[in-house]
Amino acid sequence: MKPKLCYILPRYAKDDATHLAHLTDFLKEISKTYDLWLMVLEGGYPPSDIGYQRASVFWFRFLPFRLCEMYCRFLYARFCGYTHFYAHYSFAAAFTASFLKIIFQKGKVFYWNCGEPWKYKRNILRDTFEKLTYHMIDVLVTGTEGLKKKYSEIYSISLKKITVMPNWIALQRFFPDGGRQRMRAALSIPSDAKIILFTHRLSERKGAQYLPEIFRN
C-alpha cells in the first residue's frame, strides 16, 4: 500500500504560462510513490492521467471563507488517513495543515517556497504570520543551497529543517533530438552564434541586472 500524501496546488489551468504548468510532470512522478490527494486552491481539475487517487477544487477565494473551507477539507483528509501535507507556495495552506498537525500530534507538513519573500514589502501582520508559519511547518523545501542558507539566516530556521529540491522541469521536453538545430533554422540564427535565453521578466528580483556582465563575458 502506498503512503498517503495530500498535495496542495495553488492553481491549475490548462493554458498556464507560469512555473505551475510544470507541476503536472512532477505530480506524475510522485504519484508513482504516493497515494495522492490533490487539492487545487484555484482553477479546475487537472487531468486524471497525473495519477492522483482523489482531487478537490476549492470553492471560495475570499480569505475568511477560504480558511474555513481549508480547515474543513484538511480535517476531512486527516480522517481519511492523509496526515502528511505538502503545500506549494500557499502560506495559508501550510499554516492550516500545521495547526491541525499540532492539534492531532500526527503527520508532517512540507512547505515549498523559492520566492525570496524577504524582497517584498510586508506589513507587520503579514510578516509575523509568515514567520510563524515557517516555524510551524516540519520541512521547508526550496530550490538551491544558496536559498537554503538565506531562508535559514533571515527566518532563523535550522538548516536541518530545510531540504533542497532542484526545480522539477523536465528539460527533455525542450530539447528533443535535433531541436536546437531546427530552432536556429526557424529563427535564421547562424549555427555558430552564441545565444542567451532569459526566460523571465526583466527585473532585479529575477536577476536581470546580471545580464550585461553575462553578455560581456
Image (tube, grey):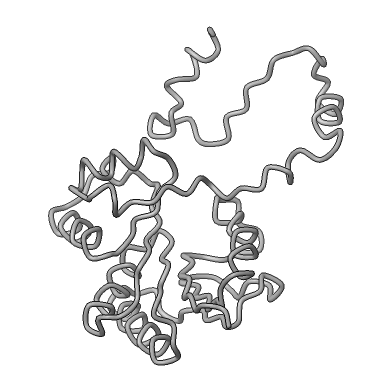
Instruction: Name the quadrant of the C terminus.
Output: top right
Front-most of residues 10 and 4? 4
Q: Which residue lies furthest to the left in this view?
A: 124
- Is 89 rendered above or below residue 1? above
Residue 61 % position (x, y): 39, 74
Front-most of residues 158 and 113? 158
Q: Residue furthest top?
A: 216
Residue 143 relative to residue 13: left or right: left
- Is 17 rendered above or below residue 34? above
Label tally: 0
**Residue at image coords 49%, 67%:** 9
Task: Classify residue 192 by image quadrant.
Answer: top right
**Residue at image coords 29%, 74%:** 96
Residue 171 % position (x, y): 68, 42
Task: Classify residue 121 by image quadrant.
Answer: top left
Residue 191 relative to residue 31: left or right: right
Instruction: Name the quadrant of the N terminus.
Output: bottom right
